[in-house]
Image (tube, rainbow, N blue to C red):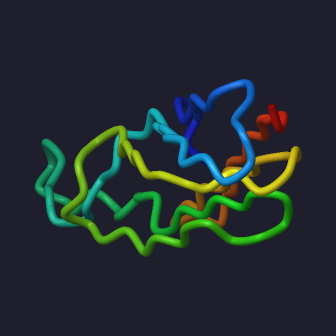
Amino acid sequence: MAEDAKPRVKVPKSAKAGEVFTIKALISHKMESGQRKDAAGELIPRSIINRFTCDLGGVNVIDITVEPAVSTNPYFEFDAVMADSGEIKFTWYDDDGSVYEDVKTIERA
C-alpha cells in the first residue's frame, strides 16, 4: 500500500434531475512505471494506480484502465447526469492490491 496515497474528489452538493454535472477526482500517488533504476542500478518495482471507477447510486459512471505512462497524482474530470439522490463511490486500484475509496453524497434539487 502506498503510504502517501490520498484520494480527493469534488462533486456538487446537489443537482436537478437530468442535469449534467462535473466530477473531479485526484489521488496523490507516486506512480512508479517500473522502468526507472535506483542509485544501485536496480529497477524500481512498478507501482501505479491501474484502474479507476466511479459509481453513482450503484450504477457505473466510468471505468478507466490506467497504463504506466500516466503522470504522478492522476487526475480525472468527467460529467455525469443526475438521476436521483445517492452516493457517488470512487475507487482506485493499486498494483500492490491496495484499494483506495472515497464516497460523496449528492442530493437531487
Is 19 positioned to the left or the right of 60 in the image?
left
Q: Residue at x 35, y 64 (%)?
A: 46
Q: Position of residue 67 (x, y in %)?
A: 30, 71
Task: Give 10 or 21, whichever is nearer the viewer.
Answer: 21
56 to 62, vertically: above or below = above
Residue 101 in the image: state x and y as whole percent.
73, 47
Taking 42 as reference, is 106 above or below it?
above
State the residue at coordinates (20%, 60%).
42
Residue pictured at 73% horizontal, 24% vertical: 13
User: In the rendering, at what x and y percent does residue 84 appear?
Assistant: 85, 52
Q: Is residue 20 above or below residue 15?
A: below
Residue at the image point whose x is 24% and y is 57% from the top: 70
Q: Quadrant of residue 109?
A: top right
Locate residue 45: give its quadrant: bottom left
The residue lying furthest to the top in this view is 13
Q: How many marks?
A: 0
Front one among 39 and 29: 29
Q: Residue 17: image x %, image y %?
A: 74, 48
Residue 33 or 105: which is nearer the viewer? 105
Lateral position of residue 90 relative to residue 4, left or right: right
